[in-house]
């Protein structure tokens, strides 16, 4: 507290840091859901089977073509009318995961399509079956290409968690709103919020840079041809 009894800047940190922990939890849980959805939908949309492509296309277009906020409202406020009640946190994770899984599927599809056809042909010539060729040749190269756009999506997901404040999850933005209602110290509170979001995004970006650098070295060292050689 300051000498006059008003809260100082550091007094705002504990509730904001508690909100930031919830924000990180939402981001990590949403990413854990979005990743398998992105892989499944990306593979399905790139497959030659109509029965797989159409359901994946409907999912991707639905969640990319509508507002995440409206999706959250449906999950939290509308589904109970159909007998399905989710906690606010579960609705937040599900909404974020479904939404960013749809965006991530395009990253997956693009990365898989970018793997040279010659690599697949070489794998087949070495006697690898379709599944083995995919797991040992195509997927590792595609995964390396997914690092940078995947990291960018994770940063966007982190920022999108602020929307869940509208379904009363006590994450960083909601904590800041409540604190501002009590103190009316808007500039200081939301200045700290900006700094905390920037710090979390910077950590994710640094991790992405490190992974991307390793992926680039892997590609430059010819890891993919080496994998083909080991498959003999």
Image (cartoon, helix red, strand yellow):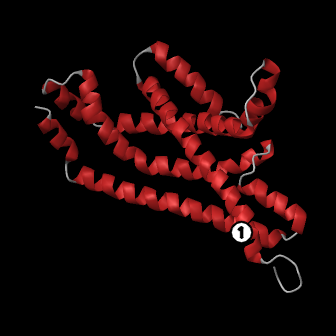
Could you tell whether 5 is left or right of 36 in the image? Answer: right
Task: Assign the N terminus to one quadrant of the image.
Answer: bottom right
Left or right of 194 on screen, residue 168: right
Above/below status of 156 relative to 62:
below
From the viewer's perspective, tell me whether residue 73 is left or right of residue 101: right
- Residue in view at x 32 percent, y 56 percent: 214
Q: Quadrant of residue 140?
A: top left
Q: Position of residue 60 (x, y in %)?
A: 58, 29
* Residue 210 found in image quarter: bottom left
For the C terminus, the image quarter is top left
Question: Between 116 and 2, which is closer to the camera in this rendering?
Answer: 2
User: Quick one: label 1, few (<14), some, or many (20+) residues within 10 Å?
Assistant: some
- Compared with 15, 134 (above or below) is above
- In this rendering, the count of numbered labels is 1
Residue under the image location 66 percent in, 36 percent down: 95
Q: Position of residue 200 (x, y in %)?
A: 58, 60
Residue plotted at (77% across, 25% down): 79
Q: Secondary structure at mark 1?
A: helix
Q: Which of these two is toward me, 179 or 140?
A: 179
Q: Residue furthest top?
A: 51
The residue at the point 58 percent across, 65 percent down is 199
From the top left corner, tell me how far across and down residue 26 is, in percent.
63, 46
Residue farthest left in this picture: 232
Residue at numbered disc 1 = 13
Q: Answer with left or right where residue 117 lies relative to residue 7.
A: left
């Amino acid at each position: 507290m300051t000498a006059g009894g008003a809260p100082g800047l550091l007094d705002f940190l504990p509730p904001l840091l508690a909100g930031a922990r919830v924000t990180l939890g939402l981001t990590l849980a949403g990413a854990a859901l979005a990743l398998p959805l992105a892989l499944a939908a990306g593979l399905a949309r790139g497959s030659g089977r109509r029965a797989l492509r159409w359901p994946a296309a409907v999912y991707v277009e639905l969640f990319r073509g509508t507002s995440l906020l409206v999706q959250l409202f449906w999950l939290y406020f509308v589904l109970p009318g159909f007998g399905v009640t989710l906690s606010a946190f579960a609705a937040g994770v599900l909404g974020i995961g479904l939404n960013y899984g749809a965006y991530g599927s395009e990253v997956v599809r693009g990365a898989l399509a970018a793997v040279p056809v010659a690599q697949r042909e070489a794998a087949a010539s070495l006697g690898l079956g379709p599944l083995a060729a995919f797991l040992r040749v195509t997927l590792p190269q595609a995964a390396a290409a997914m690092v940078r756009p995947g990291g960018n999506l994770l940063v966007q997901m982190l920022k999108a968690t602020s929307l869940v404040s509208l379904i009363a999850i006590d994450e960083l933005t909601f904590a800041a709103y409540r604190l501002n209602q009590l103190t009316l110290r808007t500039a200081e509170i939301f200045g700290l919020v900006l700094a905390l979001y920037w710090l979390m995004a910077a950590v994710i970006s640094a991790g992405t840079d490190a992974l991307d650098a390793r992926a680039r070295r892997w590609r430059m060292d010819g890891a993919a041809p080496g994998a083909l050689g080991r498959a003999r």
